[in-house]
Image (cartoon, helix red, strand yellow):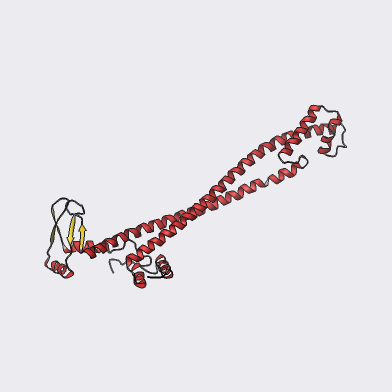
Amino acid sequence: MPTELEWAEAFRRLDSGESSYETEARRLGVGKGTVYRHHIAELQRRINVKKSELSRVTDELSKAQQSLQTLIKERRRLREKLSAVLQELNRVLATYERLKNLGLDKVASLTEFIDGYEALGFSAQQVQKLAAWRQSLEKMGIDPDNLGEFVEKRGSLQKQLSELEKERRRLNGTVKKLKNEHRRLFEKITSLKAEALKLGKLGKVVKLGMIVLPCKLCGMEGIFVKLHTASEYKSMMRSGAALQYRCIYCGRWAVYTPWEILSAIGLLATPELKEVGVRTPTNKE
């Protein structure tokens, strides 16, 4: 039997169109049907590999989409919280500006002003609201004294979403290519199986010396023809003789010429696939 390397080289030549099944059968010292079966098994193995890759890429795409949705929700939540924080900040800044207009020019920063807020004689309710605002920011992991830095840092969230979207498009392209390759291999293996089935039928015809034909009267596969020798068929064709056979389904007799019988046998040996790289002869040739 051929080695794995010899089989691999044979498959490579068949896939590239450099050779045919008949040539590889002679080269490997096996029957054409054996080459077909081994090639079909190899194609099925490739399909299984592509299926595994497709499943892995699909899982990665699903995880990327989940991450994208999580980031979108997080961005929406942060925007809502930031909006509330900015509203409160605007209110405090407005109060701060009013105080400056009253002559408090020595207030160096908003943080120093908040620390001395109660000492300035404002109501306890105002102090409580400012304290609650600072606590709210701290619970969200935001330093009230570095609110601007926090806002700038969270701006990178948009960049993360953009990168995830690019990855999603790339994975979609990979999935599409794998699906196309899977479809091509499936179509090829289906055709090869059909041809292998025809070769199996031809082998039985040769072994049993008999072929089953469709009845000309009812269309059923009910005409069992026991084959004659080549010289007998030649003699019949020269004399214009014909043969009668009875259908096992309709029970009627149908007439067949030697040409019709030999044509049915010849069709079983005709390839289902057009060999890649082999020129099909025209009627002029």
The quarter holding residue 23 reads bottom left
Compared with 14, 136 (above or below) is above
| Residue extending farthest front | 1
The quarter holding residue 128 reads top right
Can the viewer see residue 89? no
Question: Residue at point 86% right, 30% down?
Answer: 120
Can the viewer see residue 81? yes
Give coordinates of residue 251: x percent, y percent. Answer: 14, 51
Q: Which quadrant: the C terminus?
A: bottom left
Give coordinates of residue 49: x percent, y percent. Answer: 46, 58
Question: Residue at point 35% right, 60% down?
Answer: 192
- Tag count: 0
Locate residue 46 relative to residue 99 in the image: left or right: left
Nearest the eye: 8 or 171: 8
Question: Residue at point 68% right, 45% down?
Answer: 155
Question: Residue at point 40% right, 56% down?
Answer: 186
